[in-house]
Amino acid sequence: MNSSTSTPALNAHSIPFRLWTPEERRASLEEALRHWREGEDVWVYAYGSLIWRPDFEYQERRLATLHGHHRALCLWSRVNRGTPECPGLVFGLDRGGSCRGMVYRLSGQAVPDYFPALWDREMSTGAYLPRWVNCATDQGTVRALVFIMNRDNPAYIRALPEPELLAIIRRATGSRGPCTEYVIQTAQALRAAGIRDARLEHIARRLQEPVDPLPEN
């Protein structure tokens, strides 16, 4: 493997990593809800694990398309699906294209109960930018909370060559389990929801193939 493809993985452990403090997460949440009217229902857009593990009750859900961003394994994970010494990769919404996902409508009465936990989950390192973005559904456009990848965050990683991407995913395990499990489960959840992501399907298939053992010296 040449240096241009090996550098990102080899240097991943040296990238600055810091969990946000409760005060930082609270300030981010308050800013996101600055224009929210108490009691008003809200929509939350899901494109990855929120589809198969939302962790909140919802009044309604719809298939939805977000334009301007696409689903990508573009975020180093050093807790949930990896460690600081051996980071994995998780999904983010990277710039360009479009993304087919799901929107959930939460009761306005439930927002104060569910949003702090949502922030603890999605904003633990400040890697995402919470934004209110129009999402297209068959029943009309809804304005939903979307967690968009912050490209200025040190944990952001641009597209990797497939062999390196697969190697990183296969070897990483974090507090929530193997990175491989995370990617495959996301692909299965999208398929069950009627969402087609050809790139993710391909990666999931490759991850389920037998891996050739390393040659002995």
Image (spheres, rainbow, N blue to C red):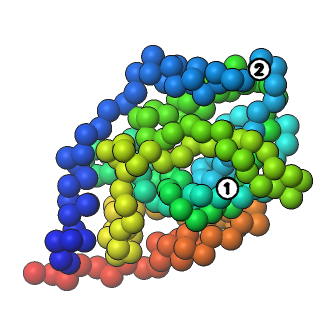
Q: Residue at x 89, y 53 (%)?
A: 139
Q: Residue at x 26, y 60 (%)?
A: 9
Camera-side residue of 25 and 36: 36
Quadrant in which the N terminus is drawn: bottom left
| Left or right of residue 89: residue 91 | right
Residue extending farthest right: 139
| x and y, in percent, of residue 57 in the image | 77, 34
Identify which amino acid the numbered label 2 is placed on.
Arg
Residue 137 in which image quadrant: bottom right
Res. 25 mark = none
Q: Secondary structure at mark 1?
A: strand
Res. 37 mark = 2
Camera-side residue of 166 and 209: 166
| Left or right of residue 28: residue 113 | right
Q: Residue at x 71, y 34 (%)?
A: 56
The answer to whether residue 182 is visible is: no
Res. 66 mark = 1
Q: Secondary structure at mark 2?
A: loop
The answer to whether residue 46 is visible is: yes
| Left or right of residue 5: residue 122 | right
Q: Residues within 10 Å of mark 1 (few under 14, many from 20)?
A: many
In the image, residue 188 sits, relative to residue 111, either above or below, namely: below
